[in-house]
Amino acid sequence: MARDYLDRLAEFVADTRFEDLPPGAIAAARDVVLDTLGAITAGSRLDENANFARLAAEMSGPGKASIVGHPYRVQPVWATFVNGAAGVALEMDEGNRVGGGHPSIHVTPGALAVGEDLGSSGRDVLTAIILGYEVISRVGTATQVKPEVHSHGTWGTIGTAAATARLMGFDAGETKTAMNLAMSMSPANTWTPCLEGATVRNLYPGRSGFQGIMAAHLSRCGYTAIADGPADLYHTFLGDGFDQDAVVDGLGDGEYRIQQGYFKFHACCLYNHPALDAVENLLRESPFTAGEVERIVVTAPPIAQIMADPEPDNMLAAKFSIPYAVAAAVHHGATDVTAFMPDKVADTQVRQLAQRVEVDADPDMNLRRYDYPSARVAVHLGDGRSLESSVVSQRGDATNPRSREDLLGKFRSLASPTLGDAGAGRVVAAVSEMETQGSVRELSRLLSSADRPTRNGIS
């Protein structure tokens, strides 16, 4: 039988050694892991995630995998489920414009949990994360997803399966089976929960990781997979096309996908970010107040028109509302986690300004492009002035990076309310030398907190 793209992908996962990875990919992976742990730690403080952690501990029984921000040790599938949910709850997890979606929250929780369970070294877990991230992003690149399909959970399952297979020592053939099984176990989700603010949406990455781990184990149980899981889902069902060649184009030849992602500095959906950067540019260059605004016109990719509700009902829906996010940026001068808390979402003045924000579509805009603006913002003021700014690459993207100090500052702001300043510092130090750790448990034990309050708010 001829080798196909999945054979090449599985061989890449099974055979790539840590020594084969370029230093840039290893350094990027450390940053991605730290950023993801910050998002998980902050999200662990929300009431529903604390309740889920307790439920998982009850349902799982004893295990070796940590639930971040809590004292529980559970089976890896449960730790992955809870940590994945916490990591997306505040919309601060990293992503990848090249492949679409959020690869790290779909691979890092599972890789850490499996590695902790097995006693894997930090080097082995870091390698599994880099390879699983590569698989997710490449499958995402190859997929022309249907407009109504949200990427959370969809092509993440295969990445957790790949990382799990790697940590369990699967050969290429076994890895391919696990990945194909995982694709047939993937969640399928629409944008509706995001737009309505239904927090069931936050369960999708964790559920995806749960299924990815199970796929690897079920392959050992003797379950069989279809020949081409990704194409089966994405060629016609969840996607409008799937390019198998794109999955392996340049595989292992240059930069790894984990070097090409973005870090969030606005606590909301990526489709807000270029517009918010443009608003910040205008506020810095020609300061104005909310009271001076007659109307604001945001031009964005066509899909962003579903995110045009100026009156979101709750915190999660506000993170998927371009009018709200823009109004919050102008009125509060902030778009961090606090700007989307319930009291801010209910602010009458912000809601009034959001009513004056229009969202237009430019069919040539696409967040996978870097040769054309991702957003344009025109602010029309009552005195007759019109201010305009456009953004191609939002701040925090690999092509427009923030400083190392900014990344560390973001992590500390997210993690310190749970772990304390000293605890957050110890995590920074541990991740910075992750590949030297004899066991990833050295890092995981720093992420537990046996005595801390839970509340729907972030300090």
Image (cartoon, rainbow, N blue to C red):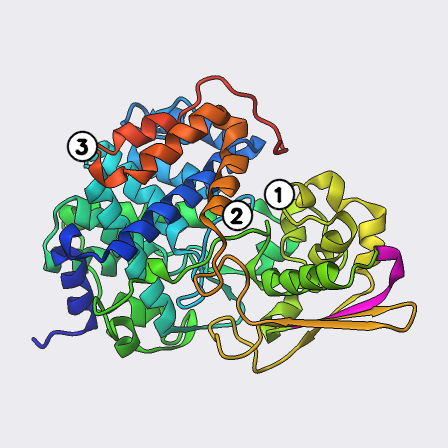
Residue type at mark 1?
Val
Q: Which residues are magenta?
A: 290-299
Left or right: residue 382 versus residue 194 is: right
The mark nearer the N terminus, 1 or 3, is 1
Residue position marked by numbered label 3 in the rendering: 438
Q: Percent x, y for residue 276?
A: 65, 60
Name the residue at 57% across, 25% down.
Answer: 454
Q: Quadrant of the N terminus?
A: bottom left
The Cα–Cα distance between marks 2 and 3, rounded to whole angstroms, is: 30 Å
Name the residue at 74% across, 46% down.
Answer: 345
The mark nearer the N terminus, 2 or 3, is 2
Q: Which mark is residue 92?
A: 2
Q: 214 or 277: nearer the eye?
A: 277
Dots 1, 2 in contact, CB < 8 A: yes
Question: Image quarter for residue 5?
Answer: bottom left
Left or right: residue 434 versus residue 151 is: left
The Cα–Cα distance between marks 1 and 2, rounded to whole angstroms, is: 8 Å
Q: Nearer the viewer, mark 2 or mark 3?
A: 3
Q: Residues within 10 Å of mark 1 (few under 14, many from 20)?
A: many
Label 1's element? helix
Instruction: Name the residue at the bottom extreme.
Output: 364
Residue 214 visible from this viewpoint: no
Residue position marked by numbered label 1 in the rendering: 337
Q: 324 or 63: nearer the eye?
A: 324
